[in-house]
Amino acid sequence: MQMFRTVTGDTTEKQAESRLSPIGISVRHVAEAQGFRRALQALSAAYAKVGNVLSDRLQHGSSDLGELATIGASYGWIVDRRRLVQTYLEAEPAVMAYACADFGEPDQIRSLAEAATELASESQSLFSALGLLSYIDHELGWAAIGGAPAGNA
């Protein structure tokens, strides 16, 4: 951060000027952007793990049509969210900063996403993982963006 002085009448004031990157993002937000990226990467991993488990259940599941419909709807929702997260990860930094403006605490989102990944690894906890991802979805304000929410599928 650069400091400069301005003189107005009898007083001298110090003002801070924030440095901007070439794309217009304040340099002090770099750490925040890295936190967002880590949270998005954890979400991507969680969606991938849950998607793989759902895919396996679809291929090797029971013949109960209700269960297959629920798993299929959840799988579709997971694929949509995985695509959304991948779009943010591949975006320019300015787009990511805009998309993550209301992201909340990235460390908490990352921690919850990692917990969802662990839950999906356990055979009887798949729907707990889906519920946790649905909660993250709601907290991020993504609940209204395409696809059926997990648990309501």
Image (tube, rainbow, N blue to C red):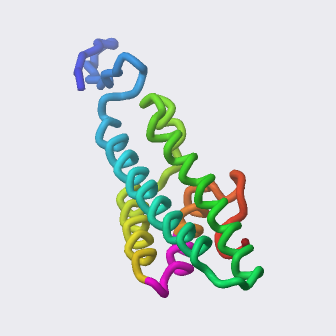
Identify the residue shown where x is 39% and y is 51%: 41
- Observer-nearest residue: 68 or 18? 68
- Observer-nearest residue: 153 or 65? 65
Q: In the figure, 49 relative to 87: above or below?
A: below
Q: Main secondary structure of the magenta part?
A: helix
Quarter of the image for the C terminus: give it: bottom right
Among all residues in the image, which is located at the extreme right? Answer: 65
5 sits to left or right of 121: left
Q: Position of residue 147 (x, y in %)?
A: 71, 57
Q: Is residue 129 magenta?
A: yes
Identify the residue shown where x is 53% and y is 67%: 133
20 sits to left or right of 87: left
Quarter of the image for the N terminus: give it: top left
Q: Is residue 116 magenta?
A: no
Magenta-tinted stretch: 123-132
Identify the residue shown where x is 41% and y is 69%: 117
127 sits to left or right of 77: left
* Any part of residue 12 in sight: yes
Q: Position of residue 90 (x, y in %)?
A: 45, 35
* Any part of residue 105 in sight: no
